[in-house]
Image (tube, rainbow, N blue to C red):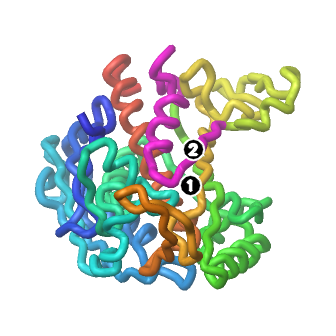
């Protein structure tokens, strides 16, 4: 069956298309009694929504969330939570000249091969707009995690080859690039603006750090915590790779450097380094969980590109419309959301194993 559902105890099912009436998500498994209001979800959606700066798509969507079920008197009821976000600024006519083309870098051909039919308006179900539903669900997961002392911090670690060296948390929401390094931020923005002026696009890396995760999350063998995180994050359309901890840099280390030395910190075990990214043997060890997502350049660019039409005839296409020259800043809350959903699901599973302790 087409995979629109994710999770084991805490599950989400997203629905809707970019140019349909709306998009949304149905969540199951959220415990009753969690304080939750539309403002908790809206705060996260505002970070992801289009039109928020000069370096994002100018599509103007307010992305106002409607809670249709599962919340009463400000508390979750334990039943399905349905969240709806209406599409208000659709311009489907922008895609009329593309409906018989397979756009380079897009899922046009593969969706046709899979289903025999596709929604060509703004990529339909394959559109990045679907991620708004994930962010809405992730906001609920974050609220659940926060009640258990777990917090997440996401930011743009790298854009167009410009890398953040320092992480100053309060800087992240002060600049359009969502960069935690005040010196790197303007250079990132400069590279995005340059690509936009040249009718092109750039990619980068989103990093998310989860603090306060207890040891014991994740399961041996197939459901290792890093495997679940990889599944979740790689399901985001623009992600082409995932790292945990030292990631690919580990191949350049010796074991004597990579191995994290444990020590006692009061009554808990900690490690002096965190090359493992908070996960050992597929199970959280109580250190910070560090995950990175490599984001490709957005596929929709205005440069002339060679492609094929649906009959197989070679054509040249220039994609007009409203598109992001770099998806990384808006992807930060998306990667945070998927990380939160995995951790919340694993925490519920661990509590089912061993109780709330």
Q: In this view, which residue lies farthest toward the top?
A: 221
Kindly state the secondary structure of the residue where label 2 is placed: strand
User: In the rendered image of this protein, does residue 19 appear above or below residue 27?
Assistant: below
**Position of 336 compared to 11: left or right?**
right
Q: Which residue is mark 1?
A: 153
Is residue 39 something one can see in this rendering? no
- CA distance for labels 2 and 1: 8 Å
Residue at the image point whose x is 85% and y is 32% from the top: 252
Q: Identify the disc placed on residue 211.
A: 2
Q: Nearer the viewer, mark 2 or mark 1?
A: 1
Find out whether the residues at labels 2 and 1 contact each other: C-beta distance under 8 Å. yes
Front-lying residue, 1 or 250: 1
Residue numbers of the magenta segment: 215-244
Point out the image quarter for the C terminus.
top left
User: In the rendered image of this protein, does residue 181 appear above or below residue 289?
Assistant: below
Q: Position of residue 253 (x, y in %)?
A: 86, 30
Front-lying residue, 172 or 235: 235
User: In the rendered image of this protein, does residue 221 appear above or below residue 7?
Assistant: above
Q: Position of residue 349 (x, y in %)?
A: 35, 25
Q: Position of residue 113 (x, y in %)?
A: 33, 44
Point out the image quarter for the N terminus.
top left
Residue 228 inside the magenta-drawn segment: yes
Residue 200 inside the magenta-drawn segment: no
Residue at the image point whose x is 65% and y is 71% from the top: 171
Front-lying residue, 229 or 311: 311
For the image shown, how many numbered marks are present on the structure? 2
**Position of 145 compared to 68: left or right?**
right
């Amino acid at each position: 069956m087409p995979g629109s559902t994710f999770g084991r105890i805490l599950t989400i099912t997203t629905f809707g298309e970019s140019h349909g009436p709306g998009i949304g998500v149905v969540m199951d498994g959220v415990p009753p009694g969690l304080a939750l209001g539309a403002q908790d979800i809206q705060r996260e959606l505002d970070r992801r929504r289009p039109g928020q700066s000069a370096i994002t798509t100018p599509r103007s969507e307010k992305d106002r969330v409607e809670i249709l079920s599962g919340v009463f008197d400000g508390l979750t009821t334990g039943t399905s939570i349905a969240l709806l976000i209406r599409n208000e600024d659709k311009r489907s006519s922008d895609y009329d000249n593309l409906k018989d083309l397979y756009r380079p870098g897009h899922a046009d051909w593969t969706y046709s091969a899979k289903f025999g039919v596709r929604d060509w308006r703004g990529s339909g179900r394959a559109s990045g707009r679907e991620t708004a539903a994930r962010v809405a669900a992730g906001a609920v997961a974050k609220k659940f995690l926060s009640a258990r002392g777990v917090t997440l911090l996401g930011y743009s670690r790298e854009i167009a080859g410009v890398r953040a060296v320092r992480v100053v948390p309060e800087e992240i929401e002060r600049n359009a690039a969502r960069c935690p390094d005040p010196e790197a931020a303007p250079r990132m923005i400069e590279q995005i603006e340059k690509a936009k002026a040249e009718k092109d696009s750039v990619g980068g890396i989103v990093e998310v750090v989860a603090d306060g995760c207890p040891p014991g999350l994740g399961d041996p063998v197939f459901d290792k915590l890093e495997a679940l995180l990889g599944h979740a994050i790689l399901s985001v359309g623009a992600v082409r790779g995932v790292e945990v901890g030292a990631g690919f840099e580990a191949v350049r280390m010796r074991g004597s450097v990579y191995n994290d030395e444990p020590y006692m910190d009061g009554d808990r075990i900690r490690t002096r380094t965190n090359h493992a990214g908070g996960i050992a043997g597929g199970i959280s060890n109580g250190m910070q969980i560090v995950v990175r997502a490599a984001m490709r350049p957005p596929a929709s660019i205005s440069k002339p590109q060679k492609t094929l039409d649906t009959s197989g005839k070679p054509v040249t296409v220039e994609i007009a419309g409203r598109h992001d020259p770099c998806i990384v800043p808006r992807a930060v809350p998306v990667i945070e959301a998927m990380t939160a959903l995995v951790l919340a699901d694993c925490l519920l599973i661990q509590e089912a194993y061993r109780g709330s302790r």
